[in-house]
Image (cartoon, grey):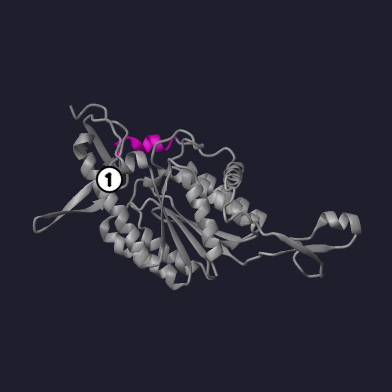
Amino acid sequence: MLSRKREQNKLKNTRENRKGNSRIPALFYYLHPMDVQQELNKTTGFKNLQLLASQVVEGYISGMHKSPFHGFSAEFAEHKIYNQGESTRHIDWKLFAKTDKLYTKRYEEETNLRCHLIIDNSPSMHYPITKKQEIGSLNKIGFTALAAASVMNLLKKQRDAVGLSIYANEYEYYAPEKGSERHHNMLLDQLSRISSSKPSGQTTDTYKYLHEIAENIKRRSLIFLFTDMFQSDRHEDELFEALRHLKYKKHDVVLFHTYDSATEVNFEFSNRPTRYTDVETGEYINLYADNVREEYQKAVKEYFEKLRVRCGQNKIKYMPVDIQQNFDVVMTTFLLERQLFK
């Protein structure tokens, strides 16, 4: 029976450590069917990520109503005469056309915020399988790419600088914080790339690359880390040590824990004999979903709570983000953190 064609599913398997008579779930594995790699490689990316991000931001802003962030965009205050040698970025060209004199715009809420986006591009982030990245049909990496592009859109409105780091089984990409149009377009190209990239079936040592990133970011920044937190328990301590490295550098750190609630939390799979295979390690387990669902849900709930507590202990903001929902959690968190960033 188990030799029949397997469903394309996944499971976070719990290994059990024994302490006396206790049984403690020690490790969550991200699991895929044996042929999932081929399906993941068929995913196509966004047609126009920049336009889609603008639509996400506009939709969020229009729905804020009496939100305390209604004035989040820097308000224009006054004009001042342009002095030779200053940046031409804020010259009011319409006023120049009327007066034949150069004036620049001054704003009430200009800041020097620097934001660095860190994205986990490991194979587990390319779950669930989707043929096309679009609203309503996003996997974790697609959701992350669009969320990051939306944050970039807000940063651009504020004239703030943004940088980007991407890692998987290697440190794939790094760009320092800048605010130019060319820089934003370059980062958008990278986000589009990873949304349709072909993941390699290897484990990812997040902590290793976070240490490298911490050394790369020279000036104090707001750090957004997007990851699904699938790793072995032996690496969990190293991960939080790396996050403390970022805190030691005086950065404000937000961990966006991305997950698919339907399958990764609620374990909504049909009760057929199925082989669940780890796309990164190749380990597998054969089981009926109904036989483990209740214990699995309990273990996941405990794991999420454990992460929340450990983040709190290290003064890291922990934000679970369900890819089945909209982007409000990410948008609101950004606006809150931007106000708090000193």
Check the image and name the residue furthest to the left: 20
Query: Which one is in front, 130 or 153?
Result: 153
Position of the C terminus by quadrant: bottom right
Q: Residue at the location (49% across, 62% down)?
A: 223
Q: Above or below — where is 272 with respect to 216?
A: above
Residue lying farthest to the front in this orientation: 66
Q: Quadrant for the N terminus, please.
A: top left
Occupied quadrant, residue 20: bottom left
In the rendered image, is residue 183 in sight? no
101 vs 275, left or right, is: right
Res 264 quadrant in image: top left
In the image, which residues are magenta?
32-42
Residue with the mark numbered 1: 12
Residue at x-position 61% and y-position 53%: 70
**Residue drawn 43% across the image and 73% down it:** 248
In the image, residue 156 sits, relative to residue 40, either above or below, namely below
| Magenta-span inclusion, residue 194 | no
Task: Look at label 1 and name its amino acid.
Answer: Lys
For label 1, the crowd category at 10 Å Cα-Cα, with few meaning under 14, some 14 to 19 and many 20 or more, is many
Q: Position of residue 85 (x, y in %)?
A: 78, 70
In front here: 79 or 145?
Answer: 79
